[in-house]
Amino acid sequence: MYGRRLRGLALTTAALLTLTLVLVFFWAPNDATLGFLQKIFYVHVPLAIVTLCGFIAGGLMAIQHLRTRDARWDVRSYVAIHISLVFGIGVLVTGSIWAKGAWGHWWVWDEPTLVSFLLIMLLYATYQPLRFAIEDPERQSRYASVFAITAGAFVPMNFIAVRLSTAYLHPRVLGSTSNLPGPMALTFLVSLLALALLFATLCKYELTAKHTRAQLRALRRRLDGETAPAPARTRSAAPSLQPVARMSARAGGGPA
Amino acid sequence: MSGRPRTLAVVAALLRKEARVELRTFESIPAMTLFSVSTYVLFHFGLQEDTLEGNLASGVLWVTLLFAAVLGINRLFVADDEQGGFDAFLLSPADRSALLFGKAAALLAYLVVVEIVTVPAFALLLLGVGIGQTMPGLLAVLVLADIGVAVIGTLVGALAVRTRARDLLGPLLSLPLLVPIVIAAAKASTPLLASPVAALPARWLVTLALYDLVFAVIAYALFDYLLED
């Protein structure tokens, strides 16, 4: 079952997110130079890390899909990339706000991380159109996996290329946690954990929803009689689980 | 029977076929060339400059070549898709990677032919400095960038051609993947097109070569999956 540990996961995520907010606003000290503005760092950087890990995880799951030909891996890869795209928009928005506050411009080209991130988002923005443009579900998932692996490999390479191209005008004080004072580092790590959990929760939610929908469809078909024609598949960018095979596999194990 | 034909022989046969198709239809190379020259004219009016040098020249050259390449990428597999080339290839006992190598080599050849015409045209129309003495360095950058464009273009072309929106998806997929090539190629050729001419920065050549290599490996690993059905 997909939904079994969902409630626990969701509650833990909510608690940890609340703790993060408390730590960010009441415990972590204000930055000496940037002041209160620096607190966006606790959202922006962990969000970016989670997003990039999500993209790479989507690529790894796509490798698994091509190797095993198991449609569930394709659904997982799709969900990981989907949620990462949503998070990625958050990264661009928070990064833009931070850039405006710190450097006075909504966009700065000499910040390699921001630029790399934009390129990655531009590439992944074509993931859904690509899926949508292929009607055959099997080919759609196969092509999507090829894309996910290529794009997943592009993520680190693109970072290297953009970073090489940029002269460092800004000192990278916030580039790593090693030079952060204790409370800041701890808040950052808690925030990273909370956002990673949020990512996991959202992925699990989407997977559960897809699974439930597939089950419902299978039950409905059974109610209409096994001979009822399969409902026409509506054109969609999202993969759906195959209900028929799963139901028959479970039929031996007792009533569903 | 000795089993599978040798990959190299298949690649050569594919290249001959591509050359024959291109010579009979003139579908890609003339269009890419004409497009490049038109774009130079557009840049002349858009930038309102009679001559360019340095980073501006480098940027105009690379953006133009890249867009021309995208035209070629979009056409690369269309004939195979529409006239049964894919089916015929899959029916043959040839190694599937041969199609990747053959198509990448064909695209590379297209790019080289296009550049033989359009780089001198660029020098003639827009460039404010002579490129005679920096030609060897520029050639190295062009070749390395072309290899990367050919490899990425073949992978993306195969990915996009059998979708409903292939004319749209081809450029959308290839441009972000080609940005690192533009970064490296533009940075590498800027000092070559500046006055006074500076030395070719070697690290950008290394970056280009590494990017080519990584994408060649990725394309080699994934191309087979685009050909099953």
Image (tube, coloured by chain):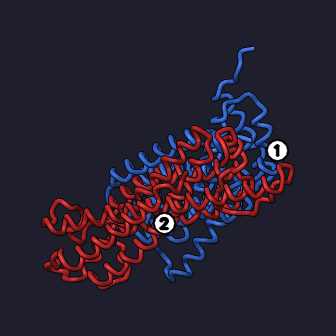
Chain colours: A red, B blue
Q: How many marks?
A: 2
Residue in the picture at 36% in, 73% down: A109
Q: Residues within 10 Å of mark 1 (few under 14, many from 20)?
A: few
Circle 1: residue type: Gly
Element at label 1: loop
**Is residue A190 placed above or below A64 in the rendered structure?**
below
Q: Position of residue B177 (x, y in %)?
A: 51, 57
Compare residues B120 and B222 and report the one nearer the observer: B222
Q: Chain of mark 1?
A: B
Question: Which residue lies at the image location 63% right of the left edge and 36% below the top edge?
Answer: B97
Query: What amino acid is labelled 2 in the image?
Result: Met
Residue A152 spot, x, y in % from top left: 47, 52
Q: Which dot, 2 or 1, sits closer to the camera?
A: 2
Determine which residue is flagged by label 1. Answer: B84
Name the residue beneath numbered marker 2. Answer: A121
Q: Chain ID for label 2?
A: A
Which quadrant would residue B2 be assigned to in this image? top right
Distance, label 2 to label 1, CA atoms, is: 35 Å
Is residue B131 visible to us here? no
